[in-house]
Amino acid sequence: MISEIRSVHFVGICGTAMASAAAALKEKGYQVTGSDQNVYPPMSTFLEQRQIPIFNGYAEANLAHKPDLVVIGNAISRGNPEAEYALDHKLKFCSLPDLLREFFIRGKRCLVVAGTHGKTTTASLLTWVFEHAGLNPSYLIGGIPTNLGQGARFTDSEWFIIEGDEYDTAFFDKRSKFIHYLPEVAIINNLEFDHADIFDDLASVQKTFSHMIRTVPRNGLLLGNGDDPNLAPLLNVNFCPVKRFGLGPHNAVRATNLRLGPTASEFEIPSAKFHLNLVGELNVRNALAVVAAAKHCGLTNKQIQSAFDTFKGIKRRMEVRGIAGGVTIIDDFGHHPTAIRETLRALRIKYPTEKIWAVFEPRSNTTRRNVFQQDLADSFADANAVIVSQVARLEQLKIDERLNPERLMSDIRASGKDAEYLADADSIVAHLAKHARGGDVICVLSNGGFGGIHGKLLATLGR
């Protein structure tokens, strides 16, 4: 099929992964066009610089040139005029994971990083280890590693490192994205119930991970967190090599002599000691997975540690956005109770005596629901004060499915913490301007833009 394709159109081109794939195809000599309803910088600038025409808004006319292939983004649903046109005229179409597999991954040595938590950090750290060692890997990551400056790159290297998301692929393919990625090495950091809009329960999440595991070849490697009880039953397979990593004595790759400091972490494996400029136990587990994968692929302990020494972190992962009025503003992508708990636990190590404010926006399809009603309240244990913004799009959910903000506030306050439920970013900024003091730490937890709250906090507290 690939040999017949000369022109490709991307529906929903302004997503980071879509735009990066479009630019890579343009570099390969394909005619590339795209459309999106949210055409604005930086992605619009990125595409314009590469001379890729973008249609602002979706319309059947955007496909009048009858491209050889239409790539339909994950956010596109039935009713979209371009999706309907492609179906009506029987144009060749595929999902982005399909495109990645056939145009960029097949024939390469692919390392897939999966799991409910830590995917972005682990994939970023693993990519930097390979990059620092001069291996020039292709990569696709759901965040922006500071060392690399972008979340995706396609090279001629034999290596491809990709963050494997369990979310569904497209409106016509409800399998998880990671099913498509042909892993030679699959890393699974952990497994919990998440994405309540597409998974019914933990068992359904385990099932989709088991499907990905079945795609690991017999000459590959499955690396799994051996301390995770939800993952344990999935690792008992005999069709591919399996290695467990973790802190427990039963793990083949085991971290010992763990030391968690306010600015760095240290751990040992039988052959080496590693120092990591990241804080918290979750990051040690992420790094342990990277060590196991990199050593399997032939890298040395010295090469791995050299990369660890120079790793600068990832945007929106405990990222210090600035200090204003003596108050430190931290941006974190946390949007699951476990991620929130681990972020705040790590911040408590980093800031042992400071007052930590946790500011949370419930906007993910899981945290808007009541499936984690109690877990969410408990996840703020290491914060001194909690502010929760109005639950996003609550009216779209059935009443018996909605997160109950009143109960959430009551449960948090019952633990002895100040807790406020405030409408939006502006009201939260006004509240913090009155009550935050020099030396405090404000951690903003959201998987969205949160009304530009970080900039507003820095500007207001700076005054």
Image: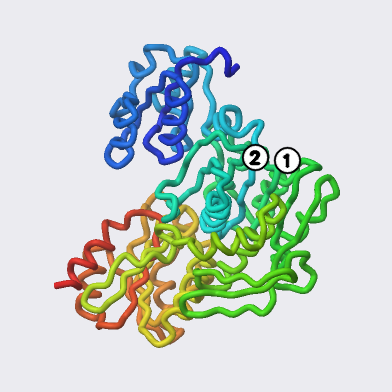
Direction right: furthest residue: 238
Q: Quadrant of residue 319?
A: bottom left
Where 384 falls versus 80 (above or below)? below
The 10 Å Cα crowd at callout 2, few under 14, some 14 to 19, many 20 or more, is many
**Residue name at image x 44 percent, y 50 percent:** 148
Identified by mark 1, the residue type is: Thr
Using the image as rendered, state which of residue 205 and residue 271 is in the foreground. Answer: 271
Asked which secondary structure carries label 1, the reply is: loop
The residue at which mark 1 appears reads as 215
Identified by mark 2, the residue type is: Ile
The residue at which mark 2 appears reads as 179
State yes or no: discs 2 and 1 in contact (Cβ < 8 Å): yes
Gap in angstroms between the C-alphas marked 2 and 1? 7 Å
**Residue name at image x 68 percent, y 42 percent:** 183
**Residue name at image x 37 percent, y 60 percent:** 391
Q: Quadrant of the C terminus?
A: bottom left
Using the image as rendered, state which of residue 351 and residue 56 is in the foreground. Answer: 351
Horizontal and vertical percent position of residue 388 = 36, 68
Asked which secondary structure carries label 2, the reply is: helix
Horizontal and vertical percent position of residue 216 = 74, 43
Q: Quadrant of the N terminus?
A: top right
**Residue name at image x 44 percent, y 24 percent:** 83
